[in-house]
Image (cartoon, rainbow, N blue to C red):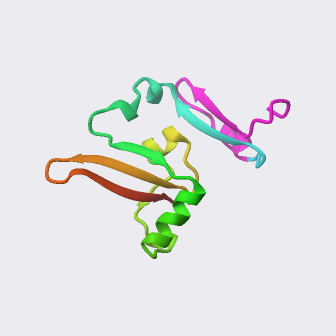
Amino acid sequence: MDQDSVTRAIVVYADKISSFAKQDLAATPKYTFELFRHSELLVNITKHKLVPKHSLLSDEEKKELLDKYKLNESQLPRILRHDPVARYYGLSRLQVVKITRDSETAGRYITYRIVW
């Protein structure tokens, strides 16, 4: 990972992962490891018809959003970092996602959530 300047990695395990393995992975602050059970990756949850489209905002887009609506970060609705979609995209704390849903009455409904 050092040789290729990689700081994030995905660890896929078959059935269980020991608490010692989790502690070792968490004890390396230089790297971020996402842990996924094999069964969690069998289906792409972002392709399910009930999951709306999620797109990550850049820092500049986030600032524009907060300025436009005169909001603080704490006033945005939250999505937990452990939410399946947030884990799928590898979202980090305080990033903002734009969620676009189809609506029968409005045609399209857009909301924003901050990763907490």
Q: Residue at x 46, y 52 (%)?
A: 97
Q: Is residue 44 visible?
A: yes
Point out residue 60 in the picture as x, y percentages from the top left corner.
58, 59
Q: Is residue 109 above or below residue 14?
A: below
Residue 2 lies in quadrant? top right
Answer with left or right where residue 45 lies relative to residue 6. left
- When the figure is inspected, residue 68 is found, relative to residue 2, above or below; the finding is below
Residue that appears at 38% across and 33% down: 45
Indicate the position of residue 32 as horizontal and vertical percent values.
68, 43
User: Magenta segment, which residues?
Assistant: 1-26
Above or below, comparing residue 52 to residue 75 in the picture: above
Query: Can you give x and y, in whole percent of width and height, for residue 68 in the image?
Result: 45, 70
Asked if the magenta segment contains residue 69, the reply would be: no
Q: Residue 18, position in %: x, y?
A: 63, 35
In screen coordinates, is 8 left or right of 3?
left
Q: Residue furthest right?
A: 3
Q: Is residue 12 magenta?
A: yes
Looking at the picture, tell me which residue is in the foreground, 13 or 19.
13
